[in-house]
Image: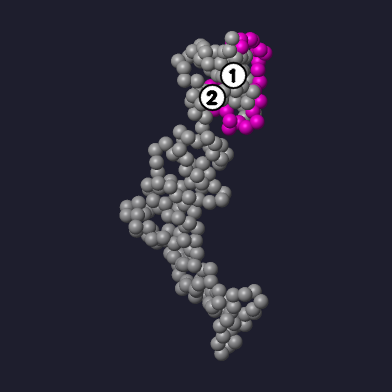
């Protein structure tokens, strides 16, 4: 609490009352004059042309050497010739060699790396993860098929939507019995999560089961892939 001979009082708690001269206000626990000063989060600063608050500090927004990032004031001369292009990443100053990844929760800086990409505020290795709506998912690795996945379909993609895929000329393959049979000429695979499906090209042939489409059969052509299924799964 501050007082002078004119009974001026400022306090930081809401129960206190301010008594002062006309034109005076409280700035935190201090008296300030809005005609001559600005108040930045409880700190007084002289008023000037183009002077604005940045957190508790004041700066001239026309000064090319100063940058305000979410309440934190920076002198960008530390970035040498890149200062005039300085960008903010939340409250952090981003250098040209940095990558800013942001989400609704936070913003984070990372050193730029080849093969990495932002997913929300995460910076991920694209060979290990995929991103869907700001969420990371492990990438299905080639050659790591589950042993139980011995019943698959094969068909030609006709059309794709966020909720389903239409296949034509569909065959059902049972690797354990070594059998193949034709199913409905137009098979609709409904998707509970569109991110679980890779990017598909209409007119191309893919393997799929009741939930997923597979693109990681590392064989020269479809016939080789079918042969591999039978070779690994067939039990006479």
Q: Is residue 97 above or below residue 185?
A: below
Label 2 sits on a secondary structure element that is: loop
Q: Residue at x 61, y 10 (%)?
A: 179
The crowding category of the residue bearing disc 1, from other C-alpha atoms within 10 Å (few below 14, some 14 to 19, many at least 20), is many
Q: Residue at x 50, y 64 (%)?
A: 55
The crowding category of the residue bearing disc 2, from other C-alpha atoms within 10 Å (few below 14, some 14 to 19, many at least 20), is few
Q: Which residue is mark 2?
A: 145
Q: Quadrant of the C terminus?
A: top right
The reply to whether discs 1 and 2 touch (Cβ–Cβ < 8 Å) is no
Q: Residue at x 51, y 41 (%)?
A: 119
Residue 191 location (% of width, % of height): 64, 28
- Work out which residue is located at the far bottom of the displayed protein and give it: 5
Label 1 sits on a secondary structure element that is: loop
Residue 111 location (% of width, % of height): 40, 46
Q: Nearer the viewer, residue 203 or 105?
A: 105
Q: Is residue 23 above or below residue 51?
A: below
Instruction: Look at the image and tell me whether residue 222 can be seen.
Output: no
Q: Quadrant of the N terminus?
A: bottom right
Residue 200 placement, left or right of 51: right
Residue 101 placement, left or right of 148: left
Q: Nearer the viewer, residue 197 or 229?
A: 229
Question: In the drawing, what numbered circle is on residue 75?
Answer: none
Instruction: Look at the image and tell me whether residue 48 can be seen.
Output: yes
Q: Residue at x 38, y 61 (%)?
A: 75
Q: Which residue is mark 1?
A: 150
- Segment tinted magenta in the rendering: 177-202
Where, by quadrant of the figure, is residue 154 drawn?
Answer: top right
Q: Is residue 186 magenta?
A: yes
């Amino acid at each position: 609490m501050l007082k002078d001979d004119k009974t001026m009082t400022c306090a930081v708690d809401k129960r206190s009352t301010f008594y002062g001269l006309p034109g005076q206000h409280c700035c935190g626990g201090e008296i300030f004059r809005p005609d001559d000063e600005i108040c930045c989060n409880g700190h007084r600063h002289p008023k000037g042309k183009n002077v604005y608050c940045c957190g508790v500090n004041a700066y001239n927004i026309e000064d090319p050497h100063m940058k305000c990032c979410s309440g934190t004031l920076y002198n960008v001369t530390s970035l040498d010739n890149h200062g005039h292009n300085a960008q903010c990443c939340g409250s952090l100053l981003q250098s040209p060699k940095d990558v800013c990844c942001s989400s609704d929760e936070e913003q984070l800086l990372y050193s730029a790396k080849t093969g990495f990409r932002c997913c929300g505020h995460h910076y991920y290795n694209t060979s290990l993860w995929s991103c869907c709506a700001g969420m990371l998912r492990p990438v299905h690795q080639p050659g790591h098929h589950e042993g139980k996945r011995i019943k698959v379909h094969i068909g030609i993609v006709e059309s794709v939507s966020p909720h389903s895929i239409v296949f034509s000329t569909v065959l059902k393959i049972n690797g354990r019995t070594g059998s193949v049979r034709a199913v409905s000429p137009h098979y609709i695979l409904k998707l509970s999560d569109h991110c679980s499906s890779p990017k598909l090209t209409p007119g191309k042939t893919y393997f799929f089961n009741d939930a997923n489409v597979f693109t990681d059969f590392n064989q020269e052509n479809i016939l080789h892939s079918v042969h591999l299924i039978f070779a690994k799964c067939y039990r006479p």
